[in-house]
Amino acid sequence: MDNRDSQEIRIGFYICHCGSNIAAMVDCPAVAKAIGKLAGVVLTRDYKYMCSDPGQELIRKDIAEFKLNRVVVASCSPLLHEKTFRGAVEAGGLNPFYFHMVNIREHDAWVHTDKAEATEKACALSRAAIRRVAKHKALEVKRVSVHPDVLVVGGGIAGIHAAMTIANAGRKVYLVEREPSIGGHMAKFDKTFPTLDCAACILTPKMSEAGSHPNITLMTYSEVAKMDGYVGNYTVTIKRKPRYIKEDVCTGCQECIANCVYKEPKFRDEFNEGLGKRKPVYIPFPQATPQVVAIDSRTCLNFKGGVLTDMCKKSCVAACGEKQAIDFTQQEILQEVKVGAIIIATGFQPFDAARIPQYGYGRYPNVYTALEIERLVNASGPTSGHVIMRDGTEPKSIGIIHCVGSRDQKTNRWCSKVCCMYSLKLAHLLKEHTGAEIYNFYIDMRTPGKGYEEFYDKLLEEGVHFIRGRVGEVTDWAASPEEEGKLVVRVEDTLAGYVRRIPFDMVVLATGLEPKSDAQDVRRLFNMSCGSEGFFLERHPKLAPVSTFSDGIYIAGCCQGPRDIPDTVAQAGAAAAEVLVLVDKGYIEQEPNTAFILDEECCGCKSCIPLCPYTAITFDATRKKAVINEALCKGCGTCVAACPSGSIVQNLFEDDEIFSEIEGVLAHD
Amino acid sequence: MTTYSYFPGCSLKGSGRAYEESLLPVLRALDVELEELDDWNCCGATAYMAVDEVRACVIASRNLALAEKLSHKELLAPCNACYLVLNKTQHYMKESPSVQGAIQKALKAGGLTCKGTQPVRHPLDVIVNTIGLDAIRKRVRRPLTGLKVAPYYGCQIVRPYATFDDQYNPTTMDRLLEALGCTVVPFPLKTRCCGGSLTGTLPEPGLHCSYLILKEALRRQADVIATVCPLCQFNLDSYHDKIAGKWGAVRIPTVYMTQLMGLAFNMNERELGLYRGFIPMKPLPASKPAE
Amino acid sequence: MKLKKRIIQYEAERVVGFADEIRNVPGCEELRSCIQCGTCSGVCPLSTYMDYSPRQIIGMVQSGFKDKALRSHTIWLCASCYSCAVECPRKIRITDIMYELKQRAIQERIYPRRFPIPILAQEFNKMAQTHGRVTENVLAAIMFLKSTWWTAFGMWRLGLGLMRRGRFPLHLESIKRKDELNRMLKTLDKVTIDMLHDERGKGEPARGGGR
């Protein structure tokens, strides 16, 4: 078949009924008839389903039989079937870019109610395509190689699982974590629903495996500072914060902690949600990975305001002895890594309960958040697993309030999905630890999931009370003697239809999940999008749930939306599989609709350079010309429109292609 | 010297006279003048909103129009209900084209115009957020040390429009009272309803609301309740006999925030209208006046 | 044993479209988004005294049980503290919906004989219109005379106390330019009726009608 651009144009036109999707609103045979009269069109057909095998076969046969050298299909969105039809054209022996697709379904049939007008619009759009396709040139799909290493950002259960999967497949992974240890939120949990297996028991083996895996480079206490490059070839700069400990030397013996000049722990312990204290030199929790201590320069006496003063007597250094693992001179360093694909698993933050003042968090000491309770019932927590409240007593009655910062238009609109189940779990654990009378206040119980409804049944059997009603307020206002000294929950029992005041010793707020406060920065760093609620946006909610709109960047876990551990692990596995598809193939094919510079016409004004959203344009100072990196160009056309001398051209969107298209739309028969 | 337009409202000329009597000298002491709207009318009032909201808004809009005639930037409305109705009218003018249309036509018939954009402010907001606590502290001559006060804000100063503080747990007055030297008792009922006009129409539930507030203030060992609204003051102060008859005596004085300010500024008790309360305030603990 | 009233509601008792009528009133638009969570009842200081909780009233309105809603004590017990409106997770302005229900009950005269609230409201209306200002003690006196006059005897001590403290004005407060206000209100009467007819297109009585 002849694939030269300059030859007699012979166009085949196909219009698809798409069952009744198009045919109900567009008179397909009439469109075919009208288009058949246009110059260059040698064949028109209307067909029920062009995307079906017989439909594609039709194109292939016609190319041979009628010596077609251009093809136009009027059907659905190119997003769905452009690839299909390009394939059919190629199978017929033509260059696949001698093809153009017209969207008469989403852009026409589905959005109009007058059949005559819709038919006329279909004609106009098709006419434009006929004129345009005549100008099409043969283009080539280019291949770019893919760097085999992978970056995983975030060392929670999602990041750990994704990194392990990829590493086990034999690929090298960099696992970057902001905190001194990997483990994320899951490391703070006591038990997991609905099986009640201990979170540490199932997580820590994975953590230590990840820590010692030959294919995983662990970078804790580190953050991504910069990302350059394009799918398959990213250069990522990682900021490694000083922990004042030589990671490779420290054995985790913790002698330094025992010998710190602070005899007693004195500072807020973040891992225990502030319920416990730690020293300036600390290890976040017993199973921390890596087993390396960290020194907090904000509280260490050897620093003042984060600046080294060397004023402390440094009993920690003496305790460390021969190993000499403590290094107060450490500075923040930037490290560059090259990777082919990236998984973002940066997780969530719990809703700040103080934002709902009527629940009294921060005002009444015995109001707790759910995460605080996780630490309180945990054997390695600040109270060694004894539920002792801030006032030193053990609660005899506990109210758990659901949907705090969820399903609320004043704070977060979405359902956080995990709170019903974790509230059930906490109710069970608190009952087990204290034998207290426990009430759950819910709007709707949401327990879909394997074994979840059964867990709810179990709690009902255990005698935990459930009241359907969103709590109005938590107050220490005692209206009657039995309320003296208690926290009183005022709520309507909506099923029974009366308002109740119930006194409690302890109130637990089941706070929802929300995007991390710096999610927008991360989004910009990796060229991703966010949904309206601020979670990272997947490319397609059903068919591309772990892809983003940036090729080569995938998401897993709660940074994409609230989910529980089983879903997170499944999603992390899916993201790892997508990465392996990319990395194992070794190359990617690139759409040829990129822009290029007409060298002789470029005057070197540089106006295009700052406009490119993909930083694909650089300036060649010796020749004084702009240069477009084809691999980075996404074909958005911004530079083409902006170039004052008209010296940038984009494949598939050349001037005469676009002008012919416009003429086609405006032309009358 | 700053001057505000001033909308006193009906109560401040009647049962809430003491509020105005203390507000004016206290503001003057802080270099703030008030210019009373010429020929102002009833604000429109909550009771009226219940019969016909649009009509209430039209009545309120006349006052807003009168305020816009004056050259001052902001309008001061000391009564919580007036403050709410005037604010709500402006909100409706913005949100609802039909209400806005009705208001404009009515105003035209009265020969008036109103943009509805002039800020309507409550004295509490102005005193703490514009005049500032530093200026207050400087003016205090006799700190109210040892006086335990339950700050009672009432509802309509923060709801439904939270213009300057939290809607459930406001703290503006707490800070003001602390600046006067008072001890502020933690008061969880600070924005719970006093019963509003129900105390007159359906006394049983209405007065019960007042009773709960008084009882809790006593339980918190407060010496006095501070209010910023004439209706709250009336409800908490005037029905003690009836309340005692129904649920038991809960005698505790209720005064205006501005009266406490006046006392701290060492002004004359009688001129501050303190004798107008049913339950008299105990003499202040013997704190020495600063020289 | 005396049996309680039936609690079943029949389809015939529904006023189809009632919820939409309420939804068309400024401030009541969010009615449909109620999830019956009960926050309104949980925060309402008067819910102690109500026959139906605010949540139940919203449910009745949504389902169109107009008569039941308008005959409830709940709508009259609302003291306009706006707690429900600001706490509602769906941003439903429940206070405004209660206002609308009160107005309709007054229009349709569905309230107990000598019930003070609508009488107070109407007298307030009259006084504000004729004098421009409200003299509270006079207003209260009129209300008691027209409603539960026998309870007014219990109020003499309060009146006396107020008088002694100079809080009981003996003359009626009034504005100077009454004509200005009157012209405004007369214009409004015409405007609202026309406007609301246009808006609803059903020729219903204007809000606060009966004028």
Image (cartoon, rainbow, N blue to C red):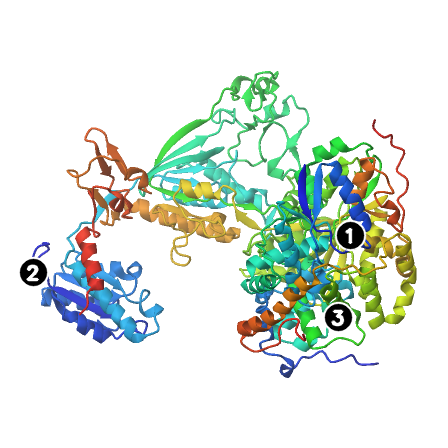
Residue placed most toward the observer, A494 or C192: C192
Q: Position of residue A94 (x, y in %)?
A: 14, 58
Local packing at callout 1 (Cα closer than 10 Å; few below 14, some 14-19, many 20+) is: many
Q: Label 2 sits on what residue type? A: Glu
Q: What is the quadrant of the N terminus of chain A in the image?
A: bottom left
Q: Quadrant of residue B64?
A: bottom right
On the image, numbered disc 1 is attached to which residue? B12
For label 3, the SS is: helix
For label 2, the SS is: loop
Q: Which of marks 2 and 1 is in front?
A: 1
Residue drawn 15% across and 66% down? A12
Q: How far apart are marks 2 and 1 (CA)?
A: 94 Å
Q: Label 1 sits on what residue type? A: Leu
Q: In which quarter of the image is residue A170?
A: top left
Asked if the residue under mark 3 is in contact with the one under mark 2, i.e. CB atoms within 8 Å, the reply is: no
Q: Where is residue B97 in the image (x, y as percent from the top left)?
A: 54, 63
Q: Distance between the residues labelled 2 and 3?
A: 88 Å
Q: How many labels does the image show?
A: 3
Residue placed most toward the observer, B263 or A106: B263
> Do dots 2 and 1 share one subunit?
no
Residue drawn 61% across and 21% down? A301
For the question of whether residue A463 can be seen, the reply is no
Q: Position of residue C62 (x, y in %)?
A: 61, 71
Local packing at callout 3 (Cα closer than 10 Å; few below 14, some 14-19, many 20+) is: many
On the image, numbered disc 3 is attached to which residue? C118
Residue A379: numbered disc: none
* Left or right, residue B130 beside residue B256: left
Q: How far apart are marks 1 and 3 (CA)?
A: 25 Å
**Chain letter of disc 3 in the image:** C
Q: Nearer the viewer, mark 2 or mark 3?
A: 3
